[in-house]
Image (cartoon, rainbow, N blue to C red):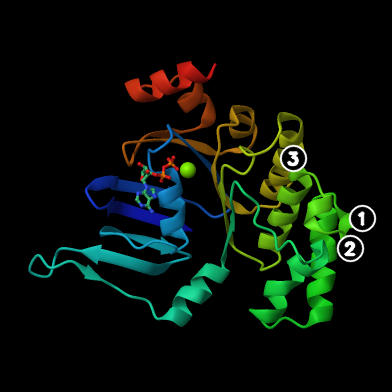
Amino acid sequence: MVEIRELHKSYGDLHVLQGLSLDVAEGEVVCLIGASGSGKSTLLRCINRLETWDAGSIAVNGDLIGYRSSERGGVPVLKELKAREVRKQRAEIGMVFQHFNLFPHLTVMENLVEAPVNVAGVPRREAVATAEQLLAMVGLAEKAKSYPRHLSGGQQQRVAIARALAMKPRLMLFDEPTSALDPELVKEVLHAMKQLAETGMTMVVVTHEMTFAREVAGRVAFVDGGQIVEVGPPEQVLDNPTHPRAQAFLSRLV
Ligand code: ADP
Ligand code: MG
């Protein structure tokens, strides 16, 4: 479902992604781990086309969503998608950030139906029915009429997950979804994500929650210096890493 090939991206002189390649199969959950600054968030933003890049390609659902190459006489060429194509692509990808960014002036229900109705043109009645199902799935059926400020951080993040799902994405990206939460609220969010994984959703999750990675991820990928230096089943990467940087990173976590 996701095919990333030799991705390079720099911010000025800072070469953040250095030829990163990754495949994610349909229905697979891949956890990305790695030190702060290694390029994990940048990678997710590229997949979602919130960033452009300098070389390499990303395909999602078989559509090449962009590439740059130096093949034409050394001149980098970017296949620019039309704005409409980028929007269509993005609609198939849901993203959940560390900070939930709910619309504060809208109720939980309105947060969930806003994009389906106004962006995707879904009839309101249908959007409401979908939202009710999603709120039930994340355990917040009773909070439809509440405003975000009256919810705990964990509840707000579960609303953010439901809101992303309301657009019926085929791929979900999570960027440290629990790292801004008080420890006692982490579990309920991970539980909602685990349930989502069990529905067969394809997910790429940046997280330092090793229990979640162990229980839910099909594979864990360790990012270092803008590359994936180790990838495999959780028990292999987390318990018997072979790359020295992965060994050092993981030994610091325990
Ligand atoms: P991670 O998510 O693994 O912590 P990031 O992808 O956020 O890493 O960042 C990788 C590097 O790129 C960091 O050194 C960060 O400071 C830098 N960086 C990220 N975004 C920008 C930006 N918009 N402009 C300049 N530098 C950035
Ligand atoms: Mg990050």
Residue 66 shows in this picture? yes
Mark 1: is the Cβ under 8 angstroms from ligand 2?
no
SS under mark 3: helix
Measured Cα–Cα span from mark 2 to mark 1 = 8 Å
Report crowding for label 3: few under 14, some 14 to 19, many 20 or more residues within 10 A (C-alpha). some
- Residue at mark 3: 191
Q: Is mark 2 within 8 Å of ligand 2?
A: no
User: Who comes first in sequence, dot 3 or dot 2?
Assistant: 2
Question: How much space separates mark 1 and mark 3, taking CA atoms?
Answer: 18 Å
If you read the primary sequence from the N terminus, does the residue marked by circle 1 or circle 3 appear first?
1
Quarter occupied by the C terminus: top right
Please give the label number shown on residue 142: 1
- What is the three-letter code of the residue carrying label 1? Glu
Q: Residue at x 42, y 35 (%)?
A: 231
Where is mark 2, residue-wise? 145
- At 77% across and 83% down in the image, what residue appears? 123
Q: Position of residue 6 (x, y in %)?
A: 28, 51
Is 65 located above or below residue 123 in the figure?
Answer: above
Q: Nearer the viewer, mark 3 or mark 2?
A: 2
The x and y percentages for residue 241 are: 41, 22
Under mark 2, the amino acid is: Lys
